[in-house]
Amino acid sequence: MKLHINDANILIDIVQLDLVDAFLLLAFEMYTTDFVFEELESFQKEALLSEKLIILKTNENELLHIVA
């Protein structure tokens, strides 16, 4: 099953509540975007960096589509 995290507050709460280890043990394919990940503080990014959480990079064409 895939889990897409589109709100930085979810990731912020996971770190703040000290649930990172439990979160990363979940049997999901976990994804977020580079935009969501950039909203985090450095210590939050470091806590969540893992092969389990895949950060999807936005390319130039996708950005042009958003602002068009």
Image: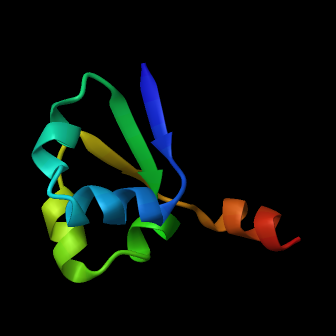
Which residue does the image show at 42% across and 18% down from the upper left? 1
Drawn side of residue 58 relative to residue 48, left or right: right
User: How many numbered marks have been drawn onto this rendered protein structure?
Assistant: 0
Which residue does the image show at 29% across and 81% down from the upper left? 41
Q: Give the answer, above or below, for where 33 lies relative to 30.
A: below
Q: Quadrant of residue 28?
A: top left
Q: Residue furthest bottom?
A: 41
Q: Residue furthest right?
A: 68
Rendered location of residue 24, percent (x, y) = 19, 39
Rendered location of residue 15, percent (x, y) = 22, 62
Q: Residue furthest front?
A: 17
Drawn side of residue 55 relative to residue 5, left or right: left
Which residue does the image show at 17% across and 77% down from the upper left? 43
Drawn side of residue 51 relative to residue 61, left or right: left
Which residue does the image show at 15% across and 39% down from the upper left? 22
Rendered location of residue 45, percent (x, y) = 24, 69
Q: Residue furthest top?
A: 1
Q: Quadrant of residue 68?
A: bottom right
Q: Nearer the viewer, residue 57 or 17?
A: 17
Drawn side of residue 50 relative to residue 63, left or right: left
Rendered location of residue 26, percent (x, y) = 23, 28
Q: Nearer the viewer, residue 60 or 27?
A: 27
Q: Give the answer, above or below, for where 12 lies relative to 20.
A: below
- Its colouring scheme is rainbow
Q: Give the answer, above or below, for where 22 lies relative to 61.
A: above
